[in-house]
Image (spheres, rainbow, N blue to C red):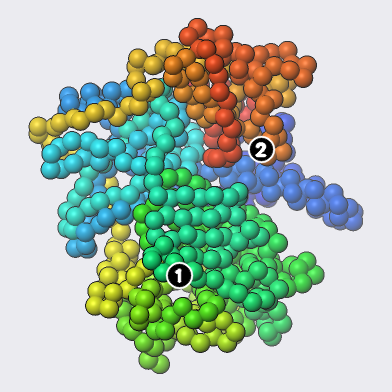
Amino acid sequence: MQMALKLIALLLIPGASMFGAEPPTRSDTVAEKIRLLEDAYKKGRHDLAMSLAESLKDTLMHERHLAPHATSRRLDSASTKPVSDLPSAWMTWANGWTHFQPISLTESAGIDRVNEPVHARIAVSHSLMNDPWREIRVVRIDSANHTLREIPSQVMEHVRFQNEHQCEVVFLADVAANSSAHYLIFFGNANAELPAYATDLKAEGEGYALDVQNHHFKARLSRQMGQLERLTSKRQHGLELYAGGKGHGEPPSIDWAHDYVDKGNFQKLRIKNWADCPNYEVIRGPVCVRVRRWGFPHSPVHPLYTPSRMHVDQTYTFYARLPHFFKNGAMEVVKDMEIAAMRDDEWVLSGYSFDETLWIDRHGKVHEGNPPNEKKNDLWGVGFFHRTSRDAFVALWLEHTASGFPAIQHGGSPTLHYEGHGQLWSRYPAAKTPLKAGTVFRQRNCYLMTDYPEKEGPGRIASLRQQLVNPLKIDGRPLPDFLGAKAVGRLARTGETETAGPLKHAVWQALRDVKDEQLYKMDANIVDMGYVYDVQVEDGIATVLVTMPHRGRPVHEFLVTQGGGRVQDGIQERTLRVPGIQDVVVNFTWEPAWTINRVTAKARAALEIKSTMPPK
């Protein structure tokens, strides 16, 4: 709410800034662009107004990257401890890292947790960590033998705000029923390299047009608009769920939500009508793949009708090792309106892969067959299974709420024989009703593609739902005493030790002499600008991983070697002048996407962007 009020103030007050900084002289504020857009529109300059609208969107995206993280479940920087506080064996094991934050996970639902995703938001003082993508490591404390073990982890998001790095870190945790487990998040190692964890989670493709798979299934997202199109089980039958036919003019997919029908049943507006996603963000990594898309649904004859009345925000999240994935969704009414109907979860499966239905009541109990009439509007999960193959596909509805609308329906009975396809469920939270601006329908769903044993199946699904609605509790309380702490191996890779430090440090310093000449007189080198993601040095060979600021400049070779009239050394020339470096390999990536949060205080000063961060 506070963020929304700041945005409103920014739109209404000329020159206002969301974050207290004076508006940069080399760009224009949101308020100024709105004024120019309104002026162009009044003059009938539609082409100019369209250009301003696009530029306005870019500015909003930039300021969104500057927004601080929510404080829920966040471990503050006050919980940071020096590695020297650890038992001596652990301190030696973690040599190279300077600080850590302890995390305790508590299980209170009486269910053994295995590979449960944990999203921890941490705040680290700017002076203690340079680059969270390279430096953060998650380590589990073995309570039985008091040893440490690094586990795969992933930095999902990173914001530099005031004097802190704020990060979302995800990892998979194991906690026994009614007990606690302890983890350490290490950081503060200038020699750290991007960790390369090997997991079963893979994502292939560009943008939101991905194929995502793990040990249990493969999911294909639409190349057009990112909706889940196909889902293939990796069980012995290789069951593939798909939707065939002509759709309604848009590409058929198994997930058809979200959509609504306007007043008088005039037209259906749906996100599957997007020619491409109006807004999206994709996070890919070894632990989690997250695809978020948002915007207003499109009319069948878009852009003849372009109502901006109900905003849709939808996120798919896939994890390593898990046979289920998640969808979070929100449908927000931004203008008083009346609907004939709306759907926030609809799945259509062509063919006849299943011959039985199941449903889950509000207490989490799994029932086979069709729900009785008195339960049809109070469902908390639905699905299908096959009596012989024991294949199953189940939706667990974990959260389904509506603020500003008390009469939300939890319906959506599964149907075995949907004409022209096969199976179907379709949830209508509201129908034939006026909706007030500010009303928001929210959901969090889990979809499970699994086997369904005749005896254990219902209990297994019920246990999973119980686990998901009772997540592990996270806190940063001090560690208990671990007497007799032991160490096996070490945390640092070969190139992350102090022995490799001097040569690697020399390479990083050399890269600070390489500048993006398109910034002309600005003293902004590619390290402080955040173009350099990683440096590895082995046997005299330096491997440098770089990015470019945006896809309008895809030719990274511009930075690699001298040429084209340039008057300075490129990455290769400058790095080869470092004593001990015999060759240089430059690799390129778009992920994670470059943002202002990669830019240091020094570069921000060179770019004339006011910063509240202390200089490095």
As drawn, the residue found furthest toward the left would be 483
Q: Amino acid at mark 2?
A: His
Mark 1: few/some/many CA within 10 Å (<14, 14-19, 20+): some
Residue contact between numbered discs 1 and 2, judged by CB atoms under 8 Å: no
Q: Secondary structure at mark 2?
A: loop
- The image quadrant that residue 272 belongs to is bottom right
Q: Position of residue 13 (x, y in %)?
A: 68, 46
Q: Secondary structure at mark 1?
A: loop
Cα–Cα span, label 1 and label 2: 40 Å
As drawn, the residue found furthest toward the bottom would be 373
Q: Position of residue 94 (x, y in %)?
A: 27, 27
Q: Position of residue 64 (x, y in %)?
A: 58, 45
Residue behind mark 1: 239
- The image quadrant that residue 167 belongs to is top left
Residue behind mark 2: 550
195 w.r.t. 498: above or below: below
603 w.r.t. 340: above or below: above
Using the rendered image of the protein, determine whether residue 5 is visible from the camera's viewpoint: no
Report the residue at 62% width, 29% height from top: 609
Q: Amino acid at mark 1?
A: Leu
Report the residue at 43% width, 41% height from top: 155
